[in-house]
Image: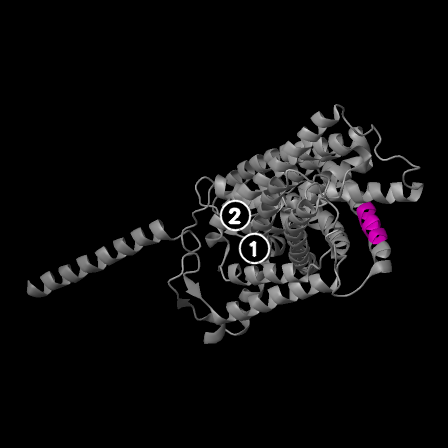
Amino acid sequence: MVENGAANKNHQAFDVSIDVFQQRDSKFFDDDDRPKRTGTVWTASAHIITAVIGSGVLSLAWAIAQLGWIAGPAVMILFSFVTYYTSTLLSVCYRTGDPVNGKRNYTYMDAIRSNLGGLKVKLCGLVQYVNLFGVAIGYTIASAISMMAIKRSNCFHSSGGKDPCHMNSNVYMIAFGITEIIFSQIPDFDQLWWLSLVAAVMSFTYSTIGLGLGIAKVVENGRIGGSLTGISVGTVTETQKVWRSFQALGDIAFAYSYSMILIEIQNTVRSPPSESKTMKKATFISVVVTTSFYMLCGCFGYAAFGDGSPGNLLTGFGFYNPYWLLDIANAAIVIHLVGAYQVYCQPLFAFIEKAAANRFPDSDFVNKEIEVPIPGYRKLNFFRLIWRTIFVIITTVISMLLPFFNDILGLLGALGFWPLTVYFPVEMYIVQKRIPKWSTRWICLQLLSIACLIITLAAAAGSVAGIVSDLGSFKPFHTSY
């Protein structure tokens, strides 16, 4: 009896431990044994808006000026639909097979590997990570321009416009780089949500200021500037008109692109409901918000300045007063770019760190996490600390070395837009949904892909023309504005 009693006690204890484990498993861990994801429609939307509404929104007036009142807004609407549609196709590919219980794909490359495989995985990785690297450099340059705009607006104000206020951008790029070294130690997307929310608020701040100044300028002028066909031949040559139109087409198309980080954002979302449903809602919200701001800022900027619209409403000095409001707007751009840099770089960081962990599974330097009492960081890893610091230093040095890198970034964006935003999502969706070849739906998807390829090639040609032009005045480490 004693033995039976002891056995019963042991059996009961064993059962309780199983129940506790199962309860812990379901409460704190997802179906892949990773810590429970906590992302929502709103955090996903914040990540997307942070990534999409970059300071490029302020250059859309210039883009519309090249295309005119008819083609400019029409192209914006067109690409908002393309981006939304291809993003919904891509969100379906987060899980392979069943949309609720299928195997998770943690990264864009994982999704390619599960659905397409072969050489396409390496091609996707090359295009995706080169683009992310390029974006980091472009954001460093853009932030420096905004920081200098604050200094220059104050200089213009104090000198009454008599001082040209030229300055070198290197010190501002270094300051941005130091800031990014600190924020780059945030381990992953899950712990980045608060920075994305702050950045999203900042993007609304400077976009709203740009919009308000544009409206005020239209009221001051008493008329709506611009023309139906954009900047006319005569003001520019026929060749310049063609290249500028291509560049404008590319600028608008790439302004919407965030597919290269969509799967990584989706991997932060909790379920139920299924991650694809949440991501479709987040994509819809983000595209509607983005398009509204793009249309308002771009159209009112063009209405204010017509064919002479500056490349950037807030840093191109289309406006000079009130200078304190311009300072606030440019400060908001810098804060936003700090967050956007992190949102874009996290997939690249994760890829390198996963590769290092697989290559050196027993290395404490690579794998050991040290607890630190710093909010937002939680754990410190020496490999992460050193390699991410080196990454930021490299992007900062290249930014100082190549003052015209925005044109090269445009080329990288042109080469990345079609494969990452259109081709791969379309091909994976066809495989995932087993769409028959030569069916009506298959043909429509392929026509969409071909049309976007043509636009990408045209935009790439425009970017190459810009690079060739910039090479004439190239001086390393002497970027002045």
Q: Position of residue 32 (x, y in %)?
A: 44, 55
Q: Position of residue 79 (x, y in %)?
A: 71, 37
* Magenta stretch: dominant secondary structure: helix
Which residue position holds label 1?
342
Relative horizontal placement of residue 447, taking residue 270 as reference (left or right): right
Labelled disc at residue 196: 2
Outermost residue toward the left in this view: 1
Magenta region, residue range? 457-466
What's the CA distance linking mark 1 and mark 2?
A: 9 Å
Relative horizontal placement of residue 150, taking residue 465 as reference (left or right): left
Labelled disc at residue 204: none
The picture quadrant where one finds residue 314 is: top right
Nearest the camera: 230 or 219? Answer: 219
Q: Amino acid at mark 1?
A: Gln
Q: Is residue 461 magenta?
A: yes
Name above or below for residue 392 compared with residue 87: below
Q: Is residue 448 magenta?
A: no
Q: Position of residue 184 (x, y in %)?
A: 53, 60
Nearest the camera: 38 or 473? Answer: 473
Report the colour scheme. one colour
